[in-house]
Image (spheres, coloured by chain):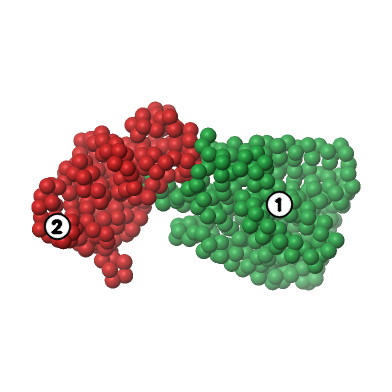
Chain colours: A red, B green
Amino acid sequence: MSALVIDALTVAFGRFRALDALSLAVDPGEVRAVIGPNGAGKTTLLDVISGITKPVSGRVMLGDRLDLTRCSEAQIARAGVRRKFQKPSVFPVLTVRENLAIGCGPDMAPGAREARIAAVLGEVGLAVRAAVPAGALSHGEKQWLEIGMVLAAEPGLLLLDEPVAGLSDAETARTAELIGRLRRPDRAILVIEHDMGFVEAVADKVTVLHEGRTLYEGGMQGARRDARVIEVFLGR
Amino acid sequence: MSGAVHTGLAAPAHERRALRDPLVAVLVGLCLAAALGLVLGRPAPYLVNAVGQLAAFAILAVSLDLVWGYLGILSLGHGLFFAIGGYVCAMHLLAHGTVMTGTLPDFVQFMGWKGLPAYWAGLEHAPYALLLALGLAGLVAFLFGLVAFRSRVNGVYFSIISQALVYVAMLLMYRNDTGLGGNNGMTGFPLLFGWPMGAPAVVTGLAVAALLTLAAVLAGARWLVGSAVGRRMLACRDDETRLRTLGYSTTRLKLRVWCLSAMIAALAGILYVPQVGIINPRVLAPDLSIEIAVWVAIGGLGRLGGAVIGAVLVNALKFWLSAAMPEAWPFILSGLVLLVVLALPNGLLDLAGLRIRPSWASGAR
């Protein structure tokens, strides 16, 4: 059984089809990268999965029971889906610890929360910054804090929207290593990214989107050799 | 804080300090001391009355700061909830007076009615009137909030609709056949709990009640914004989508705080009306509701103490100047708004911040 099945998903903004009958399946434990040129529909795909955008038609099945297109953002999150946004979205006036406490979600028992926050602080390497307001963190630290916030509730499906955009090479390497550690048999991870080296380092499989449709699906090596992918995406 | 915290009107700079604001403790202490001073010192009744009215306005300002400063919802119609409290209180006073003296209120006689309207039944009982005022304010807020928040009406659109709501209520209240006094409103309250309205003990009692209520509202609001719910309010204010995608129903959060705020505003109206001795549809005028936002902005948005200071300063100035030079008051108020917006974007509390440490240098703690 797949962790996430996207079935004939169509999203239209006026006459423009951001996603055009897109289908895609992600297995449990898999890290899937979605790449494609600007306007290919990558962020729209994450918007639909997280409930921010409603599709014209099609379904998004989590496991085999829940159709996410019928759920609110909060319901989707409580079903175990968490999203890291492209622009680091942390709460600037709250401390790192308070951000993580909110990240634990409304359902976690107060007793379990403290231990979970401590574990996540260690995992993302922000333990010494725990009492700092998130607004005072550097860009890279904000990215890690947000990854920590979405990790805090132990999601079964993790959506990462350009997690290394704007990071230095060292920070990118550290993030790749962090995502490697997030891999679990019961967790699927969907990453959107422009950085090809990063994608190659973290992803099991890539899906190349073009104009709202799948152009290629398979290994990164294959993508680099595929004539259509080279034409629309890698340039030339 | 090092940049990045300025996300428009809804996110004032000194938020971290706002969470453990010693100013609130000082103001609660001042309220209690003032209440004691009024009882023991027995100042002139007009002064006592002025203090009591200022306390009622401060409660109203705190109610708006809760939703605007901490949740990012600017209501330009909070006069509606204030008026609900005020009108129900006036109904209670008139019903109570009718029962005790056997004389019908002036406006009822003027309309040629033989008795109080049927739906006034039971309002001579103070606990029922109190419950009705708070319940009605909460219910109106709930219905309006439910529709607005579920449809995700935010920002300036919410403000405009809230303004329209108070305007509609004003037009309704100007009608003489509503049984609520029409354009003349309701006045001539004879008794409060059986005591003659103008008696010094009653004047002092009302002012003390307003001060104690303000102290309780401040302490309660301070507890709320310092709690986990308060942190969710700030999170919702700064990035509502982020909060929703972490599993929180922001509609429910906003609805709860919105209703609470409306009931606090009604409480302010309940305390205000017996002190001024009149209520009429003017309290529902849109400019009055805007003025509440002005008090909060002048004092310091997103800081409970700021709301109190703004409400007290502006209204004390208004009491004084609208008697001394009534034509000049609107210009002075406008000038004050411009000064604060241009020089002190976080309100008068910026003055204190400047002295301690400039906001751009406060950094991480």
Q: What amino acid is found at the position of numbered circle 1 in the picture? A: Ala
Q: Quadrant of residue B93?
A: bottom right
Q: Chain of mark 2?
A: A
Relative to B299, residue A132 above or below: above
Q: Residues within 10 Å of mark 2 (few under 14, many from 20)?
A: few
The image shows residue A171 at horizontal and vertical percentages of 32, 39
The image shows residue A47 at horizontal and vertical percentages of 32, 55
* Label number found at residue B311: 1
Q: Is residue A154 visible?
A: yes
Q: Is residue A155 visible?
A: no
The image shows residue B269 at horizontal and vertical percentages of 70, 54
* Label number found at residue A230: 2
Q: Are marks 1 and 2 on the same chain?
A: no
> Toward the viewer: B239 or A9?
B239
In the figure, is residue B355 to the left or right of B101? left
In the figure, is residue B58 to the left or right of B69? right
Q: What amino acid is found at the position of numbered circle 2 in the picture? A: Ile
